[in-house]
Amino acid sequence: MPYRDNDPISDGPLNSTPFGYSPESLQREALYAELDNAGVELGTYDHRIVEWIAGWDYPTVATIASLIRRAAHRPE
C-alpha cells in the first residue's frame, strides 16, 4: 500500500482482533487508499463518513480496511 511501508491491513479473513495503534491521519490514509484501489467513487457525504470512521479505534478501522481490500480483490 502506498500509505505505509509496513502494511498492517490483512489480505485474508480475520480470526482475531487486529492489534496495534495507528494515528487518525494514517487510518484516514489507509481507508482512502483501500477505497481508491477498489475503484470506489466517493461523494461529499462518503468523504464525511470516511473522515468520521478514521477517528475510530485501530482494530475497527483495520478491519473495515481489510474488508474493503478483500471485497475489491475477490476472485471471479
Image: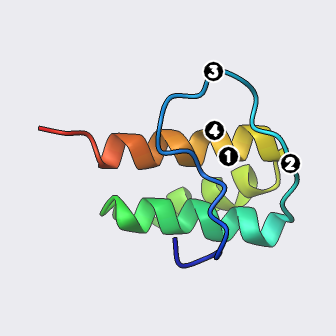
Residue contact at pointers 2 and 3, CB within 8 angstroms: no
How would you rate the neighbour count of disc 2 (Cα within 10 Å): few for under 14, some for 14-19, many for 20 or more?
few
Task: Please name the residue that numbered disc 3 is placed on.
Answer: 15
Q: Earlier in the sequence, mark 2 or mark 3?
A: 3
Considering the image in quadrants, where does the C terminus appear? top left
In the image: residue 48, left or right of residue 55: left
Q: Nearer the viewer, residue 40 or 47?
A: 40
In this rendering, would 23 be left or right of 5? right
Q: Residue at x 37, y 66 (%)?
A: 37
Which of the two discs, 2 and 1, labels the residue nearer the N terminus?
Answer: 2
Three-letter code, disc 2: Gly
User: In the rendering, which numbered label is found on residue 20?
Assistant: 2
- Residue wearing tag 1: 62
Q: Position of residue 48 (x, y in %)?
A: 63, 61
Looking at the image, the residue that sits furthest to the left is 76
Q: CA distance from mark 3 to mark 4?
A: 11 Å
Label 2 with label 1: CB-CB less than 8 Å = yes
Cα–Cα gap, marks 4 and 2: 12 Å
Callout in the foreground (1, 3): 3
